[in-house]
Image: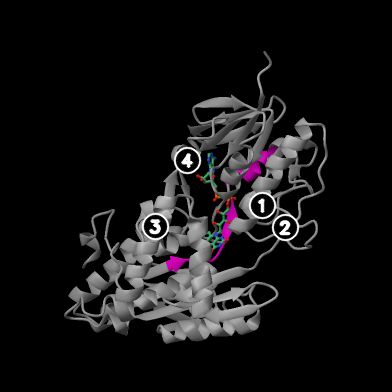
Amino acid sequence: MEKPHHVVIIGGGFGGLYAAKSLKRAPVRVTVLDRRNFHLFQPLLYQVATGTLSPANIAAPLRAILKRQENVRVLLGEAIDIDVSNRRVVLSDGELSYDTLIVAAGVRHHYFGRDEWERLAPGLKTIEDATEMRRRILLAFEAAEREGDPGELRAWLTFVVVGGGPTGVELAGAVGEIARHTLKHDFRAINPADARIVLVEGMDRVLPPYPPTLSARAEAGLNRLGVTVQTGAMVTDIDADAVTIRCGERRERIPTRTVLWAAGVQASTLGGVLASATGAAVDRVGRVVVEPDLSVAAHPEVFVIGDLAHFSHHTGTPLPGVAPVAMQQGRYVATLIMRRLRGETMPPFRYRDYGSMATIGRAEAVADLGWVQFSGFFAWLAWLFIHLIHLVQFQNRLLVLIQWAWNYFTWNRYARLITGKNPLPLLR
Ligand SMILES: Cc1cc2nc3c(=O)[nH]c(=O)nc-3n(C[C@H](O)[C@H](O)[C@H](O)COP(=O)(O)OP(=O)(O)OC[C@H]3O[C@@H](n4cnc5c(N)ncnc54)[C@H](O)[C@@H]3O)c2cc1C
């Protein structure tokens, strides 16, 4: 008997997972390959980085999510090359052949050519990144408690967040809340509320893709949490003791021990691999330019979806790297594969933008739904609801809801654990 059509999906993030789930009733075999054994809900990573949630609250094993879908198998492994002529994915320890390939490998941080900054200013993309950020934030307060020198104390209590997009705004707001509320009674030698939190953004306002009124409200909300917003500022240097920024002609050196990076992304290395294998174009950050049906030019059997895809056919500008784009593209490609197998065609992909939201702190958010913009408590409730329903497992939804309710009423963050490397050398 002829083997069913084999679809290989690289990446079990939003794009890959939604493609796999949408192939549930298709007469195909599906292999989901990921170098992690879990699906990660990245929009809530900042809450792990700031101690509200634990890593397991926002991640779920891919095997558990897909266990009832009999046409899917999950493989733990890393794709390192793609041989399009022989339709094979080369793994670090083997290979996989495919009839159709969906590449949904996402993006990683980008330090604009200053890779040495990564060590000093961690970005937020993985669970490890989040726990490393949490470690640095909490450790800074611990070090401040033991510091006798006023200059050093000031540096320990200064937090610089680079990048005023949603992640930077959410991180800065959460650090503000930790300093002003969560840690209020925890220390004896310092007052955590003395912390200086600086959010640095290169454009002239935070949340640049949002309407200016919402940017202004976000900035006002951040200010209420003690965050100083420095717009029109470029980071020119980061070292172990300070961040240097340039605002027009003015340069400022901000002494700090804690720098959090939320400024830029670049495509996963698989974007470059695929481009050299197929001759496809890549954009400035390495995303693969895709056809209107999300396939790669001259390779109708290879699709790129989610953050790794550069799609600008009906929009003029590339679609943003957000979860709804990845989910809709995953569903679209799954439907296209099923239709092709029936000998049918399908119109090009079209993105339906239902809007975007960002939180600024407890009970405060901004929402832009296109036809209406709002902010404050109701935007925050809408943000909570949307994030809860998109968490992949019921157990996680329940646990996160309980944590949020507890956090709302008590201001507490119970996942305030300093884990990882031995912190003591940092305490001079
Ligand atoms: C901190 C943060 C906050 C965000 N907040 C929001 C938000 O509020 N709203 C929103 O809509 N979006 C948000 N996003 C963006 C959203 O998470 C992404 O758009 C979405 O995850 C993209 O899905 P994807 O499937 O393309 O990639 P990802 O979800 O990144 O998944 C890629 C998968 O590929 C795997 N992989 C990569 N390379 C390989 C390889 N070589 N071999 C095997 N596996 C591989 C990875 O392990 C990963 O599981 C946020 C992102 C971050 C980092």
Q: Give the label on residue 398, or none.
A: 3
Compute the Cα span from label 3 to label 1: 25 Å
Boundaries of the magenta span: 260-276
Which mark sits nearer the N-terminus, 3 or 4?
A: 4
Question: Residue 343, image x and y in percent?
Answer: 82, 32
Q: In this view, does 5 lie above or below 58?
A: above
Q: Give the label on residue 351, or none.
A: 2
Residue at screen point 38% across, 73% down: 175
Compute the Cα span from label 1 to label 2: 7 Å
Find out whether the residues at labels 3 and 2 contact each other: C-beta distance under 8 Å: no
Helix, strand or loop under label 2: loop
Which mark sits nearer the N-terminus, 3 or 2?
A: 2
| Residue designated by label 4 | 62
Residue 273 falls inside the magenta stretch: yes
Q: Disc 4 residue type?
A: Leu
Residue 73 falls inside the magenta stretch: no
Q: Can residue 231 be seen in this view?
A: no
Whether residue 319 sits left or right of residue 66 in the image: it is right
Q: Disc 3 residue type?
A: Leu
Question: Residue 33, image x and y in percent?
Answer: 53, 35
Which mark sits nearer the N-terminus, 1 or 2?
A: 1
Locate residue 103: give its quadrant.
top right
Tell me if mark 1 has few (under 14), some (14-19) or many (20+) residues whose alpha carbon lies within 10 angstroms of its own: many
Q: Disc 2 residue type?
A: Tyr
Find out whether the residues at labels 1 and 2 contact each other: C-beta distance under 8 Å: yes
Helix, strand or loop under label 1: helix
Mark 1 CB near ligand 1 (8 Å cut): no
Q: Which of marks 3 and 4 is in front?
A: 3
